[in-house]
């Protein structure tokens, strides 16, 4: 695929992902005052849309939709470092536009600044764990069952919404995009650095640990 088409796929996929996250959060918050039920209403659409988006855009761009995932692939030398910056720009731009699209659909102010506090060591550690697990699921799928990756990622994020204290952003582009909405899924801009750093660290740890764990044994290499 041409580089322009790959970048467009990354921007569009990230935009649709964020539009789902923000839009389902607004819908859930509108329909119920029960926070647990609202979170469930936010979780299921997010996991479902990931399955769809990765299946559609995976053959085009790799369906990263996530600077931490792109960073991990660059560390693995499976994405040229020269392409990492454009990938990240496309993902962030697409994500922000996805937030704006959700606001338009729900007749809200298009540009907002989130006031939702999400900070502290527990939240940062949770983001590191969430991103580590996401990358581990992707690398495991690449090693053993590529066709299962859309489902693996969708199910992992669905679970991670509930077992992480941060509700598993696991994605710097999504975090940045969510700072532009003062709705259920928002995050204060001032809280972004801690989240983003934790996500990148989690991705790097996944590259190191899963690279060792999933390495092809020497006896297999010899037979090949």
Image (tube, grey):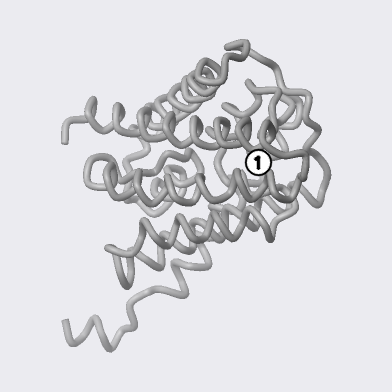
Which residue corresponds to the image point at 55% horizontal and 56% vertical from the top-left?
Answer: 158
Which residue corresponds to the image point at 63% horizontal and 53% vertical from the top-left?
Answer: 161
Which residue corresponds to the image point at 46% horizontal and 63% vertical from the top-left?
Answer: 137
Please tell me in which quadrant of the rendered image residue 29 appears. Answer: top right
Of residues 87 and 65, the one nearer the viewer is: 65
Of residues 29 and 214, the one nearer the viewer is: 29
Please tell me in which quadrant of the rendered image residue 115 appears. Answer: top right
Image coordinates of residue 87 in percent, x first then y, are 38, 32
Furthest residue to the front?
31
Local SS, label 1: helix
Which residue corresponds to the image point at 67% horizontal and 57% vertical from the top-left?
Answer: 162
Of residues 194 and 49, the one nearer the viewer is: 49
Image coordinates of residue 24 in percent, x first then y, are 56, 36
- Whether residue 42 is situated above or below residue 161 in the rendered picture: above
- Whether residue 75 is situated above or below residue 11 in the rendered picture: below
Q: Which residue was labeled with disc 1?
A: 197
Image coordinates of residue 27 in percent, x first then y, are 60, 33
Of the 4 image quadrants, the one containing the C terminus is bottom left
Q: How many marks?
A: 1
- For this view, does 63 lie left or right of residue 67? left
- For this view, does 58 lie left or right of residue 93? left
Please tell me in which quadrant of the rendered image residue 23 appears. Answer: top right
Instruction: Count residues near mark 1 (Cα–Cα under 10 Å), then give few for <14, some for 14-19, many for 20+.
Output: some
Of the 4 image quadrants, the one containing the N terminus is top left
Image coordinates of residue 212 in percent, x first then y, are 46, 72
């Amino acid at each position: 695929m041409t580089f322009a088409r790959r970048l467009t796929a990354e921007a569009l996929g990230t935009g649709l992902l964020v539009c789902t996250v923000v839009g389902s959060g607004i819908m859930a918050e509108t329909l119920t005052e029960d926070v647990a039920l609202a979170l469930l209403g936010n979780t299921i659409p997010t996991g479902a849309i990931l399955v769809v988006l990765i299946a559609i855009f995976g053959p085009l761009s790799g369906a990263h939709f996530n600077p931490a995932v792109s960073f991990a692939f660059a560390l693995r030398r499976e994405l040229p470092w020269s392409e990492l910056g454009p990938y990240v720009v496309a993902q962030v731009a697409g994500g922000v536009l996805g937030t704006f699209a959700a606001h338009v659909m729900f007749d809200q102010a298009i540009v907002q600044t989130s006031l939702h506090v999400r900070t502290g060591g527990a939240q940062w550690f949770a983001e590191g764990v969430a991103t580590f697990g996401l990358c581990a699921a992707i690398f495991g799928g690449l090693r053993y069952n590529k066709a299962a990756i859309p489902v693996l990622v969708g199910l992992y994020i669905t679970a991670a919404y509930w077992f992480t204290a941060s509700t598993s952003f696991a994605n710097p582009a999504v975090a940045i995009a969510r700072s532009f909405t003062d709705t259920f899924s928002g995050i204060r801009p001032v809280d972004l650095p801690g989240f983003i750093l934790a996500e990148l660290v989690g991705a790097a740890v996944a590259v190191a640990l899963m690279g060792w764990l999933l390495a092809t044994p020497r006896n297999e290499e010899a037979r090949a």
